[in-house]
């Protein structure tokens, strides 16, 4: 049984690690966002809602970059390539941040579904979409070690 689990893990290690660290990144994002929204910010205020999203995004992206670089994609890039990798990571995450902000704006602000329950529901939905988009962008465009390139 343990041997089979290890075999499955070894076959799908990258995806499993991405999911583990994706969940942890999501938790970092959600904890930061909810601490802000339920203490100093108000979700019914569009500016405060978007500010909480941006702050929680920054914290989560920094966590995600280091965990993805080290544990998931095992980046071997050095110096200049590492800087390019980090910049590409940030640019991709900005794209998915804008996607999350659009989703939250549409449901919470435009449709006025701004109760605490709806904020939680739409945050979880947007995070699921963002995790999938982030994996695809990371896998295909960001963490390409020189040895991986043809």
Image (tube, rainbow, N blue to C red):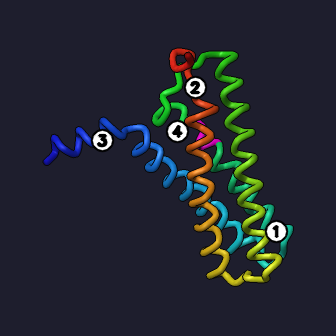
Of mark 2 and mark 3, the one earlier in the sequence is 3
Q: Residue furthest front?
A: 150
Q: Which residue is more in the foreground, 95 or 52?
A: 95
The x, y position of residue 13, in whole percent, is 37, 38
The x, y position of residue 132, in whole percent, is 56, 52
In three-dimensional space, the C-alpha distance between marks 4 and 2, rounded to whole angstroms, equals 16 Å
* Figure check: 27 above or below 81: below
Label 1: how many residues lie within 10 Å, few (<14), some (14-19) or many (20+)? some
Of mark 1 and mark 4, the one earlier in the sequence is 1
Q: Which of marks 4 and 3 is in front?
A: 3
Please state if 16 lies on the left or on the right of 59 as rendered.
left
Q: Which of marks 4 and 2 is in front?
A: 2
Q: Which residue is more in the foreground, 146 or 54?
A: 146
Q: Which residue lies furthest to the left in this view?
A: 1
The residue where tag 1 is placed is: 48
In three-dimensional space, the C-alpha distance between marks 2 and 3, rounded to whole angstroms, equals 22 Å
In three-dimensional space, the C-alpha distance between marks 4 and 3, rounded to whole angstroms, equals 18 Å
The x, y position of residue 17, in whole percent, is 42, 43
* Figure check: 48 above or below 140: below
The magenta region covers: 62-66
Please state if 100 lies on the left or on the right of 148 as rendered.
right
Which numbered circle lies on residue 67? 4
Look at the image and tell me in which quarter the C terminus lies.
top right
């Amino acid at each position: 049984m343990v041997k089979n689990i290890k075999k499955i893990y070894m076959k799908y290690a990258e995806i499993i690690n991405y999911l583990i660290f994706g969940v942890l990144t999501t938790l970092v994002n959600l904890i930061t966002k909810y601490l802000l929204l339920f203490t100093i910010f108000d979700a019914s205020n569009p500016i405060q809602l978007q500010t909480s999203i941006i702050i929680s995004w920054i914290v989560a992206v920094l966590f995600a970059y280091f965990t993805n670089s080290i544990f998931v994609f095992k980046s071997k890039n050095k110096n200049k390539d590492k800087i390019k990798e980090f910049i590409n990571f940030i640019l991709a995450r900005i794209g998915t941040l804008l996607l999350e902000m659009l989703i939250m704006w549409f449901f919470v602000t435009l449709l006025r579904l701004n109760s605490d329950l709806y904020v939680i529901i739409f945050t979880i939905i947007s995070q699921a979409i963002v995790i999938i988009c982030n994996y695809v962008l990371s896998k295909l465009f960001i963490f390409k070690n020189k040895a991986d390139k043809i």
